[in-house]
Amino acid sequence: NAHFHDARVEGLPEDAGLDFVTSFDCLHDMSHPQAVMRAIRRAIRPDGVWLICDIKARDSYEENVKKNPMATMMYGASVLTCMSSAMSEPHGAGLGTLGFSENVARKMCSEAGFTRFESLDFGHPVNAFHADVHVAQLLLLEHAGELHALEPGDVAWERQPVDDPARRVF
């Protein structure tokens, strides 16, 4: 029951009917990520989940350099690609590769109307994962062809049947 949707081609629905929305490695590249976050909030059900995957960043340049051995390369890529995109429109946010830290994500999500923000530690060396939930809800992920339930913050998978064809996932 999943549908892949390119919001550049067709805007997100504004009927609060989506159950699950994902964004992968894109918010830091957007010139106006806050507008996209508000659009996702309008599109998602009150009990829906937004799974964010973006570059694992710290709050300061010094922290990034100290804790990330790839920081120099990431800042270089950011100047050449990410910032070019993020500043390509007037008043662009200009977050760049290492500008979307957990604290920035938490603040921006709150401003967009999300009421619960949970960081998910999957142990990935480069990417950070966050779940934004309007009301606490189950996070559904596909693994090996089966849907599994994961409460934000959990590390253990549980088998969870999903048999409601009315549930919409974008």
Image (spheres, helix red, strand yellow):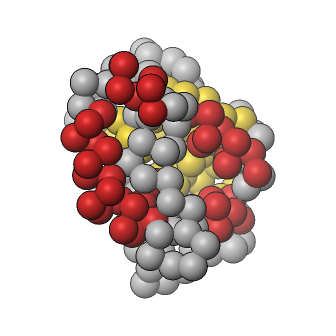
Relative to the observer, which residue lies in front, 128 or 70?
70
- The answer to which quarter of the image holds residue 34 is bottom right
Residue 57 location, x and y as percent? 44, 34
- Please state, as top left, top right, bottom left or bottom right, where the N terminus lies in the image: bottom left
Tell me if 146 is positioned left or right of 136 in this view: left
Q: Is residue 37 above or below residue 62?
A: below
Q: Is residue 72 above or below residue 1?
A: above
Residue 52 location, x and y as percent? 49, 45
Q: Residue at x 72, y 35 (%)?
A: 116
Task: Answer yes or no: is residue 45 visible.
Answer: yes
Task: Answer yes or no: is residue 133 visible.
Answer: no
Tell me if 9 is positioned left or right of 100 in this view: left
Q: How many marks?
A: 0
Relative to the observer, which residue lies in front, 146 or 18?
18
- The answer to which quarter of the image holds residue 103 is top right
Q: Is residue 143 above or below residue 121?
A: below
Q: Residue furthest front?
A: 62
Tell me if 137 is positioned left or right of 52 in this view: right
Tell me if 124 is positioned left or right of 129 in this view: left
Q: Residue furthest bottom?
A: 9
Q: Residue at x 44, y 16 (%)?
A: 155
Q: Residue at x 25, y 52 (%)?
A: 77
Q: Residue at x 67, y 49 (%)?
A: 108
Residue 67 location, x and y as percent? 36, 19
Residue 115 location, x and y as percent? 77, 41
